[in-house]
Amino acid sequence: MIEISIEKELLGSLGKMDLCIDLRIDRQSFVALSGQSGSGKTTLLRIIAGLEKAKGRICVDGEVWLDQNVYRAPQKRGIGFVFQDYALFPNMSVLENLLFVKKDKALAEQLLEMTELSELAHRKPATLSGGQKQRVSLCRAMMNRPKLLLMDEPLSALDPSMRTKLQHEILSLHKAFETTTIMVSHDPSEMYKLSSRVVVLSQGKIVQDGDAKSVLLRTQGSQKFSFEGELLDIVKVDVIYVAIVAIGQQIVEVVLDEGEAQNLRAGDIVNIGTKAFAPILHKK
Amino acid sequence: MFEKITALELTPFFISFKLASITTVILLIISLFLAWKLSQTRSRYKPIFEAITALPIVLPPSVLGFYILFTLSFHSPIGQFFRDVFGIKLVFNFTGLVVASCFYSLPFMVQPLQSGFEALPKNMLEASYIAGKSKLSTLFRVALPNIKPSMLTAVVITFAHTVGEFGVVLMVGGSIPSETKVASVAIYEMVEIMDYQGAHIYSGIMVFISFCVLLLVYIFNRKQNSHFGGLS
């Protein structure tokens, strides 16, 4: 059980804000931390790791990590941390990066095997692709068999196919090592696939907390389906208006009447939903 | 001309390079910790320490030389302390030269090291802390191996700068043959007695050695950059 109850004043995207978090996390669970940039996700992760100081209390499995009188250094927390930009040691080979954490060659080889990196064991990080680097970083974080694994947007710099591959690897490592995991992510499909619980932050506060489905599903009431998108443009065609909306990586057109068109501006975040028809799924 | 070269008194060069080598080794050890500390500190007093470290760059060597001379002489408590406790004098001898050179060349060692440390990704050092490694262990196993080009620049510039110093060594060392008369001072004296041929040879050797050293540094740094392909 991890109990976090912390407060810290920080400079967010909208000026000063208070990060104020109260969170209990069960052992071996996989928590996704989501929210807009500047909402305090990364800071929360860094406070848990001991890389930043804060007021309050952090208690992990009965051990106090942070308290009025206690501050346990990151060196003594026995955690794993995966950075968005990998943070590998360029002067060491892949294997040396792992052994730097702990001289446990059997474990290092097992991890490299699991992530299909065995053949790259003696290569330097500079010669690896982004996906390979992040797998090394993941393996390195598992080297001290951490009770708690923290990941700060580990997959956001990678292309979609590499993301899918790494998601599987993260999941299999999570299961094999039974590590309690907190991952910052922006990708709903990633959170859905990996996490058992999604916590959404906004302006330093928890605004949503629940299982992946209840937090991430966008439909309401009798809606058959609903997407959030960004309105890119509104074009007048004869008597009707056509809105161009970006949803994820795709762009769609939606017909609007004049009244609707007048209330919308390019750049607005909109919800597109439908009630009357059942959506049709085709395999591509 | 040929006779002149074979009859050349090489002792001033020998003293110059001995002085530069010792100064570089001492400064490397001191500056590693100083530069690391400066690069990692978040103290608001950091600019004060940086300004003090950089002072020798802007001060005229005579000012620096004067203060060092004054501080190390028997007229000051520090000079008296060294005379009474260790029985050594620190002016007008080689030891004094080393002490003065360490002050004079300090920024040339600290600054390249500090900017090397500061250019390291913060996450990389944090990854080492999270792996359970202390700050000292992180310095030697992660930070230092990844700033090799900065370290080489610092060592070579410090060495070259110490070989090239003139004002401070003249003031603190005097010009005692075979003791404190370094190459730059020897050239000055040759010009003063209008031995232009000797001054030409000495100066030519200085230019040649300095150029070769700098050339090697730039070649090495170029190779390092293409080898590492930047930090990742």
Image (tube, coloured by chain):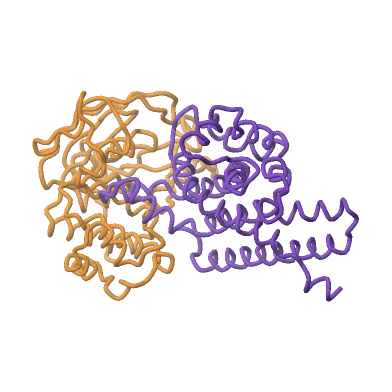
Residue at point 21%, 69% (across, down): A109
Most foreground residue, A249 or B208 = B208
Instruction: Name the spot of residue A188 as percent of width and height, x first.
Output: 28, 47
Quadrant in the rendering for residue B203: bottom right
Which quadrant is home to the C terminus of chain B?
Answer: bottom left
Residue at point 88%, 53% (across, down): B193
Quadrant in the rendering for residue A26: top left
Q: How many labels does the image show?
A: 0
Q: Can residue B89 be seen in this view?
A: yes
Which chain appears orange? A
Instruction: Name the spot of residue A89 as percent of width and height, x first.
Output: 38, 58
In the image, is A97 to the left or to the right of B70? left
Instruction: Name the spot of residue A187 as percent of width and height, x first.
Output: 31, 49
Quadrant in the rendering for residue A113: bottom left
Compared to residue A135, the image places residue B133 above or below, namely above
Most foreground residue, A57 or A99 = A99
Residue at point 83%, 75% (across, down): B3
In the image, is A25 to the left or to the right of B200? left
Q: Is residue A224 visible?
A: no
Which quadrant is home to the N terminus of chain B?
Answer: bottom right
In the image, is A52 to the left or to the right of B29? left
Compared to residue B185, the image places residue B229 above or below, namely below
Most foreground residue, B25 or A182 = B25
Most foreground residue, A190 or B77 = B77
Instruction: Name the spot of residue A210 as percent of width and height, x first.
Output: 17, 37
The colour chain B appears in is purple
In the image, is A168 to the left or to the right of B201? left
